[in-house]
């Protein structure tokens, strides 16, 4: 079984460098094109299901991809929602990072919680779709830190519309690619 994490397409807040988090911001036209581009990349693989976070930017990305691949859109999984940034949502990411370089933002969900939700969401999808290859559309922070946890090392930022793949080998998650680039075997645990 292979899984593909796809980060939703671009929104105006992504374009403008603003924290979105749990704010429900729609895709823009660039984001819709990124969804079409992701679908074209996925077309030659045997995907059997597509699911997403419930936030509209992820859901619309998943709808576009499902339509292009001729796959019925599956459910939304609340555990796949983006990290809640609290009062920082809608503010400049650059300014927040400059003020809190450790990225421990006051009032924001902590990274350990994000990883726990990401692992739980993927485990639920694996249980709901046994033996199937599943596309999972969600958000940059949850993808980044879940893959980092699976790989046992830091994974760089996740790009809008990018595809990262992983699979379950026995009881171990094995990260295959990040942002469409193969993860070197030496980098895998």
Image (cartoon, helix red, strand yellow):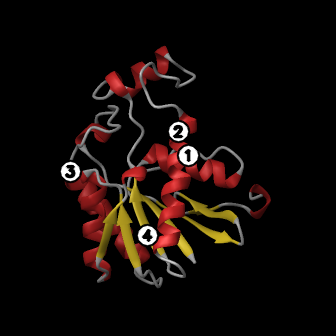
Asked whether the beta carbons under mark 4 and mark 1 sit within 8 Å of each other, the answer is: no
- The answer to which quarter of the image holds residue 154 is top right
Say which mark, if any, is on residue 28: 3
Q: Which residue is mark 1?
A: 116
Q: Which residue is mark 4?
A: 135
Asked whether the beta carbons under mark 1 and mark 2 sit within 8 Å of each other, the answer is: yes
Location of residue 51 in the rendering, given as x and y in whole percent from the top left corner: 37, 67
Kindly report the distance in space between the C-alpha atoms of the residues bearing marks 4 and 2: 23 Å
**Relative to 142, does residue 124 appear above or below in the rendering?**
below
Asked whether the beta carbons under mark 4 and mark 2 sit within 8 Å of each other, the answer is: no
Location of residue 41 in the rendering, given as x and y in whole percent from the top left corner: 42, 73
Q: Of circles 3 and 1, which is in front?
A: 1
Sequence order check, earlier mark of 3 and 1: 3
Q: Which residue is mark 2?
A: 113
**Relative to 36, does residue 155 appear above or below in the rendering?**
above
Quarter occupied by the N terminus: bottom right
Q: Nearer the viewer, residue 64 or 41?
A: 64
């Amino acid at each position: 079984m292979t899984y593909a994490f796809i980060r939703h397409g671009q929104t105006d807040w992504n374009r403008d460098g603003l924290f979105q988090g749990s704010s429900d911001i729609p895709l823009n036209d660039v984001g819709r094109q990124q969804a079409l581009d992701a679908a074209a990349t996925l077309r030659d693989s045997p995907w059997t299901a597509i699911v997403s976070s419930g936030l509209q930017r992820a859901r619309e990305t998943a709808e576009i991809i499902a339509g292009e691949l001729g796959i019925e859109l599956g459910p939304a999984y609340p555990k796949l929602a983006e990290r809640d940034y609290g009062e920082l949502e809608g503010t400049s990411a650059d300014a927040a990072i400059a003020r809190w370089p450790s990225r421990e933002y006051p009032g924001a969900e902590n990274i350990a919680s994000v990883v726990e939700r990401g692992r739980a969401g993927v485990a639920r999808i694996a249980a709901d779709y046994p033996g199937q290859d599943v596309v999972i559309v969600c958000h940059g922070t949850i993808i980044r830190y879940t893959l980092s946890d699976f790989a046992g090392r830091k994974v760089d930022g996740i790009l809008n519309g990018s595809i990262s793949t992983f699979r379950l080998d026995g009881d171990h998650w094995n990260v295959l690619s990040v942002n469409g680039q193969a993860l070197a075997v030496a980098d895998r645990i």
